[in-house]
Structures are given as structure tokens and as C-alpha cells.
Image (cartoon, rainbow, N blue to C red):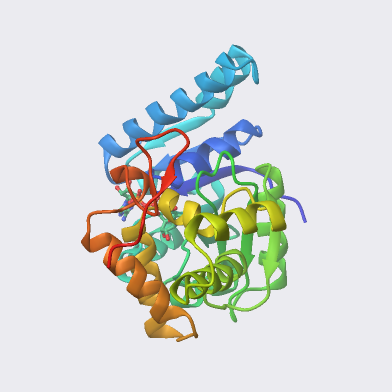
Amino acid sequence: MSAEGRLLVLGAGTMGAQIAQQAALHGVEVDLVDVSREQLERGVAQNRRLLEGRVAKGRMSTEDAEAALSRVRTSDDLPASAPECAWAIEAIVEQVEAKRQAFGELDRHLPEGAGIATNSSTIVSSRLASATRRPERVCNMHFFHPVLVMDVCEVVRGPQTSDETVARAVAWSRRMGRTPIVVEREIDGFIVNRVLGAASREAFSLLADGVAGVEDIDTAVRAGLNWPMGPFQLSDFSGLDTVLGVRRDRMLREHQPGDEATVTILERLVADGRLGRKSGRGFYDYSTDPPTPLPLPS
Ligand SMILES: NC(=O)c1ccc[n+]([C@@H]2O[C@H](COP(=O)([O-])OP(=O)(O)OC[C@H]3O[C@@H](n4cnc5c(N)ncnc54)[C@H](O)[C@@H]3O)[C@@H](O)[C@H]2O)c1
């Protein structure tokens, strides 16, 4: 199954702008569409900075960078852009109703054979497919932040998704220079976040039980499993308020041992204004180089 034609990316935020640029780096002509002209401009400017950074490091030529940037056409007019596209990836706000509306609009304006994938981390395609007249052509394509760096794309099959659509989503991921993996069922967290969640819950339980400290658990995971970051470093990197939101939400949907320990520790840190790297302090203090571990608030 091959992937051909133009790609439409809906939503030019953190994810959408880079999804569009990643495809363009691999020769795909892209329409990046957003309701906000400001977001489009911000996304394009950020992509330019990222590619100029690659040029400055000698990792790509100025010509290739300019060519890749020029392959992304921006628009706030979905009905005008969609008819020319063969596949769409939706990356708008994480709200079911907004996504259902967007899927309905994409369905009205895309050619009949085009597939529609959502990049959502938590909203599965079976909740969106019925807003279209092509439910068998709808699936999740879950990219990771930052898209220009993180290589994997989880293609998630909904109960309504056809084999052909899964094969096309896999082909589109490859065409975009990303490594696809197929998730055969709509399961909470898909694969990557599920494995990460399990490891992270265990790390928080060990910390709460006093088995080892923050730095030793991080070192164990880095040096013993060869992961690039330990669970507490990664939490600081993602933002502790964000991680707390995800964990609380998950605990309500599917309770697992270790959830309380995770949420309790994170709540104490967030209440203390320790949000991770973005606030300068989290599990570690980032005013020093290298960062130093901080005691947990009581
Ligand atoms: N941020 C992450 O780390 C991450 C990682 C993986 C997946 N995701 C998923 O990607 C999606 C987008 O997340 P994000 O962090 O890029 O969000 P974001 O808030 O940065 O961007 C959302 C964009 O969608 C636009 N938008 C809103 N409604 C629209 C509409 N009807 N039509 C067109 N554009 C519209 C907004 O103007 C904004 O530019 C979410 O579904 C999220 O679950 C996010």
C-alpha cells in the first residue's frame, strides 16, 4: 500500500506544525490549516528556527531547508485546501466535540477516498468516526513531541477501521520518515505511554516506600536499562502539573496500584510551585549545572 498525494494537517499548534514540517522534510507537499492565522505564523516561524538550527550545525543544506519550508502551505480555509489532499491528520485541541466537528468538516471537503487520522493521545478514532461518512477510513496516528526528533508513530486501529486504512496509515508514517507501529485495539495509553506509565508508577511507589531516592532511581533506570532519562527527570521535563493531570485522569478511568503514590507526590510538589524544568525546580533544582536533587516537600 503506498501513500501518495498532498497531506492536510489540521491544527498548527505544538504538534500539527511539526507534523507538517516532518512530512515536508521527506518531500511531501502539505497544507497546514488552522482557524488562527497567528498560530499558523507562529508554527511556520518555529519550524524555520528549527531547520535553521540544523543548517547551523551542518546537518542540512540551506537549499534543502528552504525547499522543505516551502513545501508547507498555510491556510485558514479548510474547504479550499481539503479537496486537493489525499490524507488528513487532525491535531487540534483535545476536545471530543471540537474534533467531531472538525472530522465532519474534513469529511465534507476531502476527496472520497482520503483517510482521516487523529493525532490525539487519548481520544480514540471510534469516538470521531461517526461524525464522517467514511468511518472505515478513520484511525489514530499518534506522533510524539517533539515530532522532528521522536521517531515513532502509533497507528491505532479502531473497531471501524479497515485493513486498507491501517496499511495506508503505516505507508504515510513511512513516507513522512517516521517508524510506524500498529496497535490492534483501542487501549488506554496505546503502547508507549502505557509502558511509560507502568514504569513510572513503579518508580513513584519505590520512592514513596523509601526504597531509594530520586537520584538513585533515575540513575538505576538510565544506567541499568539504558533509557536516556530516569522517570523523575522525564517528569520534570514534561512539567509536573501536566503529568499530574494525566495521572489523575488515568486513575479515574483505570485504577492501578501505585497511582495514589504518584498523585500524592506530584500534588505536594505542584502545590509548592515546583513544576519541573519550566519553573526551575521540580524533583531537581535547575539553577545548578548539573541539576541537584531536592528533598520532597513534607
Ligand atoms: N502536546 C503534546 O505533547 C502531544 C503529544 C502527542 C499528541 N498530542 C495530541 O495532539 C493534539 C494537539 O495537541 P497540541 O499540543 O498540538 O495542541 P495546541 O493547543 O498546541 O494546538 C492546537 C491547535 O489547534 C487549533 N485549532 C483549534 N480548533 C481548531 C479547528 N476547529 N480547526 C483548525 N484548527 C483548530 C488551535 O488554533 C491550535 O493552533 C491533541 O489531540 C493532543 O492529544 C499532543
Horizontal side of residue 266 vs 124, given as left or right = left
Viewer-side residue, 225 vs 292: 292
Q: Position of residue 30 (x, y in %)?
A: 53, 38
* 148, above or below 140, in the image: above
Tell me the residue at 35%/52% (across/down): 282
User: In the rendering, at what x and y percent does residue 247 appear?
Assistant: 40, 72
Quadrant hosting residue 75 = top left
Q: Is residue 158 above or below residue 275?
A: below
- In front of the other: 60 or 28: 60
Q: Nearer the viewer, residue 7 or 150?
A: 150
The picture quadrant where one finds residue 176 is top right
Quadrant of the image containing the C terminus: bottom left
Left or right? Give the position of 261 relative to 223: left
Q: Please provide percent x and percent y for residue 289.
A: 44, 33
State whether residue 195 is above or below residue 61. below
Position of 47 compared to 194: left or right? left
Location of residue 128 by image quarter: bottom left
* Res. 142 visible in picture: no
Which residue is rendered at x = 41% and y = 64% of the image? 103
Residue shown at 58% from the left, 34% from the top: 24
What residue is drawn where x is 49% and y is 62%?
A: 213
Q: Position of residue 21 (x, y in %)?
A: 53, 35
